Image: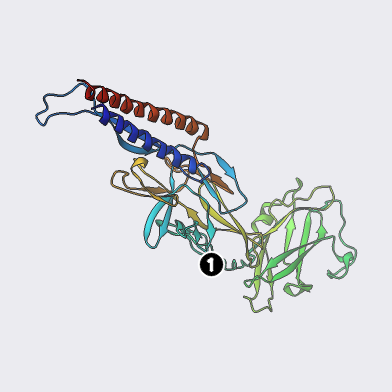
Amino acid sequence: MSFQQGLSGLSASSKTLEVIGNNVANANTVGFKQSQAVFSDVYAASLSGSGNSPIGIGTKLAEVVQQFTQGNVTASNNPLDIAINGGGFFRMSSNGATTYSRNGQFQLDRSGYIVNADGARLTGYVADSRGILSTGAPADITIRTSDLAPEFTQTVTAQLNLDSRQSTPLTTPFAMDDPTTYNNATSVSVFDSLGNAHVLQTFYVKTGAGTWDIYAAADEALINGGASVGSLAFGTDGALTAASQAALPAIASIPVTTGASSPLAVGIDFTNTTQFGSSFSVNKLDQDGSTSGRLSGFGIGPDGTLTGRYTNGQSAVLGQVVLASFANPNGLQPLGGNLWAETAESGNPMVGAPTSGSLGSLQSNAVEDSNVDLTAELVNMITAQRIYQANAQTIKTQDQVMQTLVNLR
């Protein structure tokens, strides 16, 4: 029986060394999870359950368990490298087959899909042209490289301070090419429905104590036939009167000859404009339109949202990476290539957005290193080697005992 015990011990030590060797070999494999050999003892028993021997007959490999602990996160230069900080797996798709991975080294293929080194596609929630996510079934994520459509300007937000100490212009009537006919002026670029820029100028003419007329021009041409497009009235506290605020926004109707929708009606909102005894100042002058833009870059947020950056200064949601978790990760079947497949033992995948439930967060420009502790593995290797030698010694000893019995006369 000692021969069988020693042989089983040799086999167990050999399996341990194989597991350790695999861990050491993958110490630099991104997303790799180390394994541990689990053994059980073996006892002989009769079919009736009686006659059990208190002496075991060796050991056997029960299973190889993977340790799904967090690996270190290391920065990288690839914006498509993604590290999972916490629980969950990337959901990958390859020719209709769904697999799972912790390796976040991704790149773009020629069709714009986010893929791993083997061509499996990363899945998640896709977004339409308006940036609205479809949070139903996950699909292959693709990066839209089409231009971002322009947005025509609807509102210009102007927050000014008009100097109450100024006098009414001595020269009348208003003429945009004669600075003596107005007190102050501002300009801002606005955009038509095709994304063409137009310079909108506004002129402010004081008409009395606390009252101002507003004139406008676009592309060096007066709007509204040269007539005022609105007026502002201020109270003794320097704020706009209720009647003046109710008349806002002032509408500037801009003729467009670029083939876009014409006229371009832009509302100029002067809410929070003041008239204090200080110099004229422009505190805010914004507009809500934009020209078309080309994709210049993208980033992935902690919640998996993939956001594209465009040359016109705008951004848009392109999709969202999803993660999957399992009730029993150790039940997953390793496939190689940093991939796992679900099994009956692992349970069904629970798919959701990162940071939700038990799912971890994502970090772009980073990868999750292997969780192999190389120092511990080398110590385990020494221990396994000694155990192998000890089991070999039991076989050698049993051989010497048998030899002694053979030599009895």
Question: Which residue occupies 50% across, 34% down?
Answer: 373
Q: Which residue lies furthest to the left in this view?
A: 48
- Residue 57 is situated, as x and y percent measured from the top left of the image, at 24, 28
Q: Which residue lies furthest to the front in this view?
A: 409
19 versus 310 height, above or below: above
10 versus 280 height, above or below: above
Question: Which residue occupies 51% across, 46% down?
Answer: 29
The residue lying toward the viewer, choosing from 354 and 185, is 354
Residue that label 1 marks: 110
Q: How is the image coloured?
A: rainbow
Q: So how many labels did they put on this image?
A: 1
Q: What amino acid is labelled 1 in the image? A: Arg
> Would you identify the image quadrant in which residue 400 lies?
top left
Callout 1: 10 Å neighbours few (<14), some, many (20+)? few
> Would you identify the image quadrant in which residue 60 lies?
top left
- Left or right for 313, reference 130: right
212 versus 70 height, above or below: below
Question: Which residue occupies 43% across, 44% down?
Answer: 88
Report whether residue 86 is seen. no
Secondary structure type for disc 1? loop
- Left or right for 43, reference 105: left
> Would you identify the image quadrant in which residue 252 lies?
bottom right
- Residue 299 is situated, as x and y percent measured from the top left of the image, at 58, 53
Q: Quadrant of the N terminus?
A: top left
The residue lying toward the viewer, choosing from 392 and 30, is 392
Q: In which quarter of the image is the C terminus?
A: top left
The residue lying toward the viewer, choosing from 278 and 346, is 346
Report whether residue 49 is seen. yes
- Residue 168 is situated, as x and y percent measured from the top left of the image, at 86, 59
